[in-house]
Amino acid sequence: MPDVNPAPTTAAAELDAIIVGAGFSGLYQLLCLRDRLGMKATVLEAGAGVGGTWYWNRYPGARCDSESHSYNYTFSKELFEAWEWSERYPQQPEILRYLNHVADRFDLRRDIRLNTAVVAARFDAATNRWLVTTAGGETLTAQFLITAVGCLSTANVPNIPGLEGFAGAWYHTGQWPHEGVDFAGKRVGLVGTGSTGIQAAPVIAETAAHLTVFQRTANYSVPAHNAPLSAEFKQWVKANHAEIRRVMQSTPNGHPFVIADRSVWDVTPAEREALYEAAWAKGGLQFRATFRDLLVDKAANDTAAEFLKAKIRQIVQDPATAAKLADIDHPYAAKRPPIDDDYFATFNRPNVTLVDVRAAPIQRISPAGIVTAAGEVPLDIIVFATGFDAMTGPLLRLGIEGEGGRKLADAWAAGPRNTLGVQVAGFPNLFTVTGPGSPSVLCNMPVAIEQHVEWITACIARMRAKGLTRVETTEAAMDAWVAQVNAAASATLLPQAQHSWYLGANVPGKPRVFMPYAGGMAHFRRICDEVAAKDYEGFAFSA
Ligand code: N01
């Protein structure tokens, strides 16, 4: 796949829109603005290729937890039918091939500038235009600035004393070397047991001399049961584009499965156990769709939590290790629920050890390894699967300044505030695709992205049709939306996971604010449609 794009076709001075990021969001946003609205738009991408998240996250075992036939765009029936996934869950290289296919199919590359990181963006009220500065020192201007930077693109490397003196090699999973890492014969330390660590551990264990997993918060996981897709299933997918799209757009989390209408309390304990067993056997994220009340009723959630903890104790042979793995402190799915290929069974291998760093915290990194309160673990390689400065991190690092030079970092000092996840008062003509306050990370991402991009496109189309040059949400609309985001989170068990990145808890000093909109994607779509139908209530336009 080419990592070199043709020279841009639009001179920088003539731009209508600058889009930051060439992942799922940026590619579709470019297509919408350029090909549907006839605008002059350019994508600025820091990486040397398109793909966003899937360009950077190349760690061992990197795979999407959404089922492949749902992890794609649905706006084009022809595209949907032309692409064939090979497995139930797509691996990173296959997703990257898909996004490159999209870039080529829609001739997007000529308007994408690779290796072009944005370091500053300032709104000029005199011209109603954004001035965007790149790491190369160039300044481009455009009427609209649209961030398509993803929610999980700012790697969170923990500030552990001594890392700089480590004699071995270390990597963060979100910035994985393109040439790969050879673990053969090496003592590897894996820090972090979120979705990424749980995907990576079994794969690293296959070749490493020894793998030590440093667990701070024990986690649930459900088997993915990944497998090649049958010819019949592929045929069924191609024949059912409209229905798959309809189901995904009608569900709270944008997946192609429907949440059961029954309560945990509608069935007997034996029936419940049988339903959980069936969901376990089926595998994947749909385990949480077994009952409708798993995320809102703690006692209901406890039944799923107990089932999953019992599974850990059954799978893991060493009772002490099993006890540490099953000592989970939060409701099931209150943190993003991982799915896995043999994660718990990995601890039965003779070359794998679990270290509980909640009981004996990491103190420092020595030249020889990781030092916890219980002693030193000698290592050749450290892998940080420690997640991201999620949702706000990718936006704040762009150095955005709105009207009057107000920094986004200052506007969000106490946590993110915006309207519909898409606009911030004081930052005219700035749109944030899947920003905080949108369902984004609580949803199958392409579904959330298509909705956000299409809403932004429709808003801009309306402006162009009416000769308007400036759009900005109001403080009152923002207050109302922040209240709705808080209310939606409070109605669920999600805020009960104290160590969750949804709350910003994984980054020291970050305000503890529940960031994504938890009211469900389908409901969010209705709200956005109503706002648009009321002539963009809560947004002020001017010429
Ligand atoms: O990151 P995480 P992730 N010392 O933040 C631990 C998406 N994703 O990369 O819980 C010791 O979830 C931290 O511990 P704690 C998905 O949305 C998608 O795994 O903070 N440990 C935790 O165990 C996911 O949710 C796919 O106590 C430290 C881990 O590191 C999101 O990415 C696949 C530590 C971080 O877990 C992020 O997942 C993979 C420290 N100083 C990921 N700092 C798909 O399928 C952190 N930890 C699309």
Image (spheres, grey):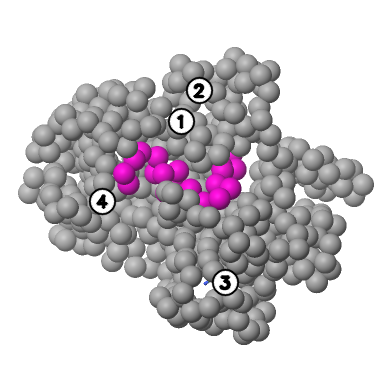
Would residue 214 be seen by someone viewing this image from the given angle? yes
Q: Amino acid at mark 2?
A: Trp
CA separation, marks 3 and 1? 37 Å
Magenta stretch holds residue 52 = yes
Sort mark 2 into few (<14), some (14-19) or many (20+) by Cα contacts within 10 Å. some
Tell me which label, 4 or 3, sits earlier in the chain: 4
Mark 2 in CB contact with mark 1 (< 8 angstroms): yes
Say if 170 sits above or below 484 in the image: below
Mark 3 in CB contact with mark 2 (< 8 angstroms): no
Residue occupying image coordinates x 41% and y 44%: 55
Q: Which residues are magenta?
A: 47-66
Ligand 1 - quadrant of the structure image: bottom right
Residue linked to disc 3: 379
The location of residue 303, given as percent across then percent down, is: 80, 55
Residue linked to disc 2: 83
Tell me which label, 2 or 4, sits earlier in the chain: 2
Residue linked to disc 4: 117
Tell me which label, 3 or 2, sits earlier in the chain: 2
Residue occupying image coordinates x 14% and y 31%: 10
- Magenta highlight: main SS: loop
The location of residue 290, given as percent across then percent down, is: 75, 42
Residue occupying image coordinates x 70% and y 68%: 353
CA separation, marks 4 and 3? 34 Å
